[in-house]
Image (cartoon, rainbow, N blue to C red):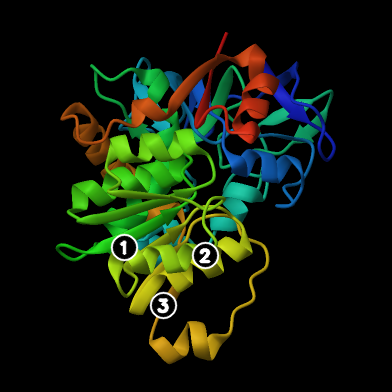
Amino acid sequence: MKIKAVLISEKDQPNEKTEIQLDPPKRNEVLVKIAACGVCHTDEVARAQIIPVPLPAVFGHEGCGIVEEVGAGVENFKKGDRVGFSYGYCGTCENCSTGKPYGCEENRHLNFGGTYLDGTKRLHDNGKDVSVFFGQSAFASHAVVNVNNLIHVPDGIDLKLVGPLGCGIQTGAGAVLNYIKPGAASSIIITGCGSVGLSAVMASKIAGCTTILACDVIESRLELAKELGATHTINAKKVENVAEEVKKITRIGTNYAIDCTGNGNCVRQSLNCTRSLGLCVVLGATQELTIHVENELMGTGKTLAGIVEGCSIPQIFIPKLLEYYQKGMFPFDRLISLYKFSDITQAVEDMHSGKVIKAVLVMD
């Protein structure tokens, strides 16, 4: 079938819609009419080929929509179901089989390698194969998605809001609730108050952290962080040393730190904000980092960890986040700004400038 999609054929090509071909779903796959898709920094990193996804490709990995057709072997989804998308995993490797699909042995292949699990592609442009992204390629009017990527969305939830839960929002919230699991009355600093960081702020409040510090350079984001649960905020542009400011508040540093910036200097700063035996978690796609291992890590018994997708099993964790949302405990809708699909360029610009926290494209 012919669909509308944003096709990227070369590095840094502008985001413009065109018409391409989509094959029907195969075994354990469904065809979904896309309702909306979040715009994530990872899409831009791939478009810039910092993550070298094979081109041409259609990006977009925070999709949601309505099932239009199911392939052979699909039992738990039917035409008309409302679904959200998340990352792809094989479901059969050791990590998947032990409840850790975020550590799937095929993770890089399924999400960044450009093909489905069987090694084939479903998208084509003038007879040339087009790479899939995260097993969905949701910057499009339709997508073929494996059942492993899908989450049922209950009635009563605005479907347009659900897409970002599949990556950025579950990453931030999951880092706290699934990985760190903070102790009672603990302290945490979250650096980078975009959708990932602010989700971590909300999750820290749910977890019972009594000292929640939010660090950023955009004052409006710090103000929102306070409204969402931060007890203290630090504007890194207005202080000489963030780690020293943290110690003024906590005396010896925080128990935990989460860095969402993707900046090596900020990761080092976050690590130095923690106390002895502290834990620093890296969520941003950071390239290079230099630390003094004795002084900043091993000598103080600290842990520096990188995690994937918030250590989340999407089919379990995303329904929990939606339950928190319905109870008023996780107001993630406050992070979202809606754009028409045709306004994708403006959405990306507004995301880069910091004008919006989470841009979500609503399909025309």
Decide if residue 150 is in sight here.
no
Please tell me whether mark 1 sits on a helix, a strand or a loop. Answer: helix
Q: Quadrant of the N terminus?
A: top right
Foreground: disc 3 or disc 2? 2
| Amino acid type, label 1 | Ile
Mark 3: amino acid: Thr
Marks 1 and 2, Cα distance to the nearest angstrom?
Answer: 13 Å
SS at mark 2 in the image: loop
Query: Which numbered marker is on residue 278?
Result: none
Q: Compare residues 186 and 6 and report the one nearer the observer.
A: 186
Gap in angstroms between the C-alphas marked 3 and 1: 22 Å
Q: Residues within 10 Å of mark 1 (few under 14, many from 20)?
A: few
Give the percent coordinates (x, y) of residue 48. Answer: 76, 43
The answer to whether residue 85 is left or right of residue 327 is right
Residue type of the residue flagged with mark 2 = Asn
Residue drawn at x 44%, y 91% is 299
**Label 2: which residue?**
241
Count neighbours of disc 2 (C-alpha within 10 A) and say few if under 14, some if 14 to 19, many if 20 or more: few
Q: Work out which quarter of the rendered image holds the C terminus and state it.
A: top right
- Residue 77: x and y, percent? 34, 28
